[in-house]
Image (tube, grey):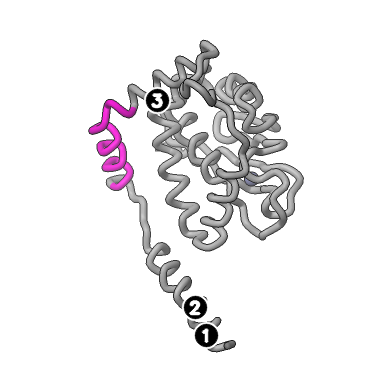
Amino acid sequence: MKEKKESVLEKIEEIRKQLGALTFDDETIQAMRDKIASHPELGKAFGEAYGKYSRGESIRPTLGNEMQIFYMRERQTLTFLLFPELLKLEYEVARMIGESVMADQMGGYTLPEIMAHNEPIAERDKYAIEKVIEADDKHAIYRHYECADCYGVPNIGMKICAYEAGTAAGCFSAALGKRCEVTETKCCANGDPYCEFLVTVVEE
Ligand SMILES: [Zn+2]
């Protein structure tokens, strides 16, 4: 029985090893942009959805835009628990979403201005209560209280909010015109009472 369990775990390890080889260099990231650009109908649909949302209109005729968040949390928490390597993939895909879909919502020119302008959006859209802790031209720190992704998730020793980090990286990079990276340094799924994110401006 014990042997059987070990061989099953080895199966997961095998897949993790394959996923661990994923790399996202500049060329790959540009290829991801090109792929998304080859589907302009998607960008258009996403833009129209945001437009409807901001006018208080529903995307779905009967059920509206809201749903409880458990489905999303269960799906992604177990995905990352089993295959933590996918956090990197999620981060890079989310960067594309930030760049191509959400960047329109940004305002301000300097990083502190951008952070201040962005702060109320999380609470408006109900994915967290955001507080900017510090911000200068090179870096910023912000927190998410009651994060939709991880608040109430037990401590599994992981920082799982790669979607937030990636979209933020994409949005801030687009708004600033300089590449930014965002790292989650605290997370409810890691035993912390809130998520904390470090924004770093990568000079080019
Ligand atoms: Zn988190």
Q: Please report whichever mark, 1 or 3, sits nearer to the chain's N-terminal start.
A: 1
Residue 137 found in image quarter = top right
Say which mark, if any, is on residue 8: 2
The local crowd at label 2, few if under 14, some if 14 to 19, many if 20 or more residues have their Cα within 10 Å, is few
Q: Please report whichever mark, 2 or 3, sits nearer to the chain's N-terminal start.
A: 2
The local crowd at label 3, few if under 14, some if 14 to 19, many if 20 or more residues have their Cα within 10 Å, is some
Looking at the rendered structure, the secondary structure element under dot 3 is helix
- Pointer 1 residue: 4
Q: Position of residue 131 (x, y in %)?
A: 70, 30
Residue 41 on the magenta segment: yes
Q: Which residue is drawn at 42% across and 64% down?
A: 20
Q: Residue at x 64, y 38 (%)?
A: 148
* Amino acid type, mark 3: Phe
Label 1 to label 2: alpha-carbon separation: 6 Å
Kindly tell me whether mark 2's CB lies below 8 Å from ligand 1: no
Q: Quadrant of ligand 1?
A: top right
| Image marks 1 and 2: residues in contact by CB distance under 8 Å | yes
Looking at the rendered structure, the secondary structure element under dot 1 is helix
Q: Residue at x 57, y 44 (%)?
A: 71
- Residue stretch rendered in magenta on the structure: 28-42
Looking at the rendered structure, the secondary structure element under dot 2 is helix
* Amino acid type, mark 2: Val
Quadrant location, the C terminus: top left
Q: Position of residue 31 (x, y in %)?
A: 26, 42
Quadrant location, the N terminus: bottom right
- Pointer 3 residue: 46
On screen, 199 above or below 78? above
